Image (tube, rainbow, N blue to C red):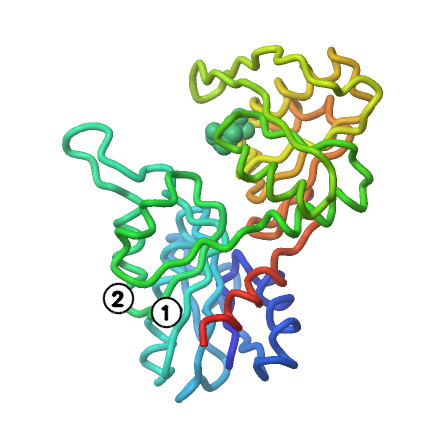
Amino acid sequence: MKVVAGSASVELARELTRDLAASAGAGFIEVAYEKHPGGFPDGERYARLLGPVSGEHVVLVQTTHPDPMIVELFLLADAIRDAGARRLTAVVPYFGYGRQDKRFLDGEAVSAKTIAKHIAVDCDELLTMAIPANPEILKTFPLPTREVSGMPAIGRYLKSAKVDVILAPDEGALRLAKEASSVAGVPFDFLVKERIDSYTVKIEPKALAVRGKSVGIVDDVISTGGTIATAAKELKAQGARRVIAACVHGLFVDNAEKNLKGLDDVIATDTIQSPHTKVSVAPEFAAAIRALG
Ligand code: R5P
């Protein structure tokens, strides 16, 4: 087995290789991401495999955010196939465009499906994590696709941070809070969120027993930080002693850092690298790859 990384996911792919080295004999194949120092002047991506993959089961790891990383994924998948790989598993830790899981307005593409269709050109199967949409969309993808959970990794972190309770910032994230709490061995609950627009949310003050407690809030994505900041404000108002936010995908766009100032800690996994990446989901993907058979 060989592991190849797009430039968005090098750290996670190296970690994954370490996890799969003993059990699956995995080795890491280096990639050159630039042909010329500084890249192409017009910003086009470049990717070149620097090792052989002929006859191998290759695991290609690449988050599809920001957009140029999608092109890199397709270039690498094609190069791996052309170089004679026997089997190609795409690990897309953060599946960009996952939110557009249906045609909201006439004339739109179902973008999540568009990306999946192109992955299916060269890849045999797809593993992804915490798709920010209805996971039912995965069943419509034209290649076998599995959503791997990142909550065990987050649950382990929150356990070591000694939180007393784990909360979801909305009912949609309740399944995440439930899973993380079973790993951390603490109770779970959820807050009631109403989204006003892309930047604003309202959290209803559902009375929770958080006074004097250390609270972990878990979500699939932190984007602008609006959801988590509003939830943390409500929890502090209800007497929480400490509020730690944990997400699978840390996008941290716009004023996220400013919005998250009131939190005692903000952590994200390595599906997207950021200064908040403190947890690796490599063990979760390694287990899913071993289970592929
Ligand atoms: C949507 O409901 C998601 O689960 C997240 O809560 C949302 O994407 C977070 O976005 P933001 O950080 O911009 O509030």
Left or right: where does residue 171 sit relative to residue 177?
Answer: left
For the residues bearing labels 1 and 2, Cβ distance under 8 angstroms: yes
Question: 134 or 119, which lies in front?
Answer: 134
Three-letter residue code for mark 1: Ala
Rendered residue at 44%/85% (across/down): 56
Ligand 1: does it lie within 8 Å of the C-beta at label 2?
no
Rendered residue at 26%/37% (across/down): 102
N-terminal of the pair, mark 1 or mark 2, is 1
* The quadrant where residue 135 appears: top left
Q: Residue 207 placed where, x, y %? A: 66, 12
Three-letter residue code for mark 2: Val
The extreme left residue here reads: 107
Badge 1 density bin: few <14, some 14–19, many ≥20, Cα 10 Å: many
The extreme bottom residue here reads: 55
- Element marked by disc 2: helix
Left or right: where does residue 217 sit relative to residue 174?
Answer: right
Rendered residue at 38%/82% (across/down): 85
Badge 2 density bin: few <14, some 14–19, many ≥20, Cα 10 Å: few
Which quadrant holds the C terminus?
bottom left
Q: Mark 2 points at which residue?
A: 121
Left or right: where does residue 176 sit relative to residue 53?
Answer: right
Q: Mark 1 points at which residue?
A: 77
The numbered disc on residue 245 is: none
